[in-house]
Amino acid sequence: MTVAATDFRERASIDDVTARLLDSSAALSYDPNVEVAWDEPIPDDHYGLNPEWSTLYGTRMWDEMSEEQRVLLTRHEVGSIMQTGIWFEMMLQQLILRDQYAKNPAKSEFRFALTEIADECRHSLMFARTCDVLGIPQYLPPRMTVELARLLKTTAGAEQAYGPILVAEEILDVMQRDWMRGENVVHIVRSTSKIHVVEESRHMKFARAEILDAMRGAGPVRRHASAWLFAAAAWFIVNAMVSPEVYPNVGLDKERALAEVRTNQHRKAMMRMSCVHLMDFLAEAGLLTRRVMPVYQSVSMI
């Protein structure tokens, strides 16, 4: 009887979380077709993202670039990040559907999961439209990343399904909180960032609750396996965010640009700052182990 009571309390806990998230979703959700001024002209001098978030900001190459090149680079960078986001959101929708397959539809957890999928569809559409308005070409993650993700979305379950989701959303959340306030950032990026920040805050709470719920009672083997999967997913996500092709597409030397990005201490500091809350949560969940920390360090997340 004691075990059953404990299981009930754990289940009730996540149902309580998702019930609150459903209320929040009903009270505060956006329609990008209405909220974003898609037809408003794009000022020539407005960036795609705050310059401080550019991969080359703080480098000699940035200092040598014309203002026009800087603006163009940031637009291609935000377009690449958004298209990586679309790719990831399509994957996470499949992960959530697989996790919720045959679960009780009367539960708030099930209903919020489907609500999140609806949100992600709208987000992908608004990111796609933003790239179209800004004239950004297609950018995809590296082929190996795309193929490994096929395996993940087909096999991952429980915390291994929600971990990569949380990693991607936490990193982007901090960036977009800056972009939505950037007076020199194009208005459609400010508007879409605001929508994404508000609605993804619910998704992150859902992912955290699912991870903590799944990790209750997990043994050391499972915990270490999940810690490695989270770290590997983070490594691939960070490396896929800005395509190397953005640099030649704006008239920059690709090899030199990549070399400067790799040694850009400003970019590394911004990345570490964007991951503080994520690392705190992973530590709380027992998923930031000593052995996986070098993986996070290799992509400047810690």
Image (spheres, grey):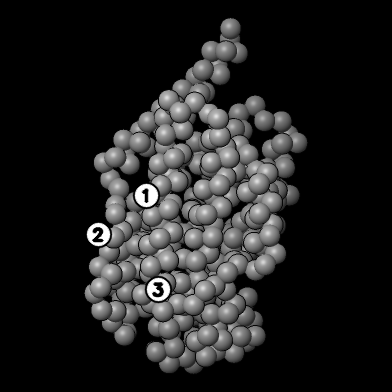
In front: 282, or 125? Answer: 125
Specify few, some or many for label 3: CA neighbours under 10 Å numbering under 14, 14-19, or 20 or more: few
- Which amino acid type is marked by label 3? Asp
- Indicate the position of residue 297 as horizontal and vertical percent values: 65, 60
Q: Which residue is mark 3?
A: 132
- In-image side of 179 versus 14 (left or right): left
Identify the residue at image location x=28%, y=82%.
43
Q: Could you say which disc has been placed on residue 34 in the image?
A: 2
- In-image side of 289 versus 119 (left or right): right
Q: Earlier in the sequence, mark 2 or mark 3?
A: 2
Q: Which quadrant: the N terminus?
A: top right
Residue 223, located in which quarter of the rendered image? top right
In front: 27, or 281? Answer: 27
Specify few, some or many for label 1: CA neighbours under 10 Å numbering under 14, 14-19, or 20 or more: many
- Indicate the position of residue 295 as horizontal and vertical percent values: 69, 57
Query: Between marks 2 and 1, how big is the CA–CA gap?
Result: 16 Å
- Which amino acid type is marked by label 2? Val
Is disc 2 in contact with disc 3, using a CB cutoff of under 8 Å? no
Identify the residue at image location x=49%, y=77%.
137
